Amino acid sequence: MNPTPSTVSQRFPRASRYHPQWVLAGISGGANPLWLTEWLTEAVDLRPGMRVLDLGCGRAVSSIFLRRELDVQVWATDLWFSAEENLQRIQDAGVGDGVFPIHADARSLPFAAGFFDVITSIDSFVYYGTDELYLNYLARFLKAGGHLGIAGTGVMREIEGAVPTHLGEWWMAERPYCLHSAAWWRQHWERTGILDIALADTLSDGWRFWLNWIKIIAPENVTEIQAVERA
C-alpha cells in the first residue's frame, strides 16, 4: 500500500510547521509554495530587515513565509489575486507589519529603481520571464549587489523534437511550452550580462515531491500523475 501523501516533509522542516489546511487554502498554482520558498531560501542570502519583492506571489503564502521565517520586509506582488484578499490573509497570519500586498503586472511594476535587496519568484516566473528583454527590465529594481532567485516547475532536460511517449498525453493536454530546465535558465540569464549566476540547479528527487503534491491537490488528475510516475 502506498503511503498517504502529506504536506509534512523532513526535507522542508520549516514549511512542515504550517497547518495543512492553511497551506491548501493558499494554493494559487500547481506547486507547493512553501516547499519551493524554503528550498530557494537555502541559496539566497536573506537577512532581517531586507526589502524583498515577492513577484507573482499568488495568495501571498510565500510572502508570509519569508516574513515569519527570515524577518524580511516583503512586497507581495501579484496580478491574478487581489491585494485586498492577500491583505486579509497577511493580517490573519500576524505579519501585517512587514508584508505589503500590491496588485500589479510583472511588466508594469510600481517601484523605484534600486528599491529591493532581493527579488524572489515562486512558481510564476515562467509566465513572464522567458521574454528575452524581461530580465533587463526587472533588474533595474534591484540595488547594486542585490540578488534575484526563482524556483518553480521545470523539466530536467529541454525537449527537442518529438515529445517523449510517456509525456505525450499530458503534454498535449497542458502544452507547457514555458517549462524549461535549469541549464536553459542559466543560459537565458547569462547571455544578458546583467547578472552573475551563482547557482542554477534542480531539487534532488523533485519529481517525487511534485508527485506527492499533485496527489494531494488534484488526485483526479490521472494523466499528469501517470506522466510523472513514468518519467
Image (spheres, helix red, strand yellow):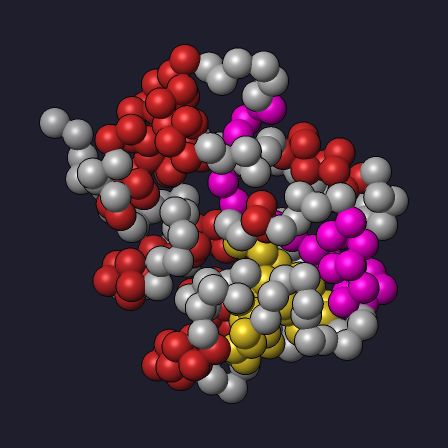
Quarter of the view holding residue 4: top left
User: Where's the C terminus, which quadrant?
Assistant: top left
Residue at figure coordinates x 32%, y 43% from the top left: 213
Is 39 inside the magenta-drawn segment?
Answer: no
Residue at figure coordinates x 38%, y 16% from the top left: 166
Residue at figure coordinates x 53%, y 30% from the top left: 155
Is 137 inside the magenta-drawn segment?
Answer: yes
Viewer can see residue 12: no
* 231 over 17 or under it: above or below: above
User: Where's the N terminus, which quadrant?
Assistant: top left
Which residue appears farthest toward the right when viewing the image?
193
Viewer can see residue 30: yes
Residue at figure coordinates x 52%, y 45% from the top left: 152
Query: Left or right: 7 with respect to 198?
Result: left
Quarter of the view holding residue 54: bottom right
Residue 228 in picture, x, y percent from top left: 36, 26
Residue segment shown in magenta: 133-158
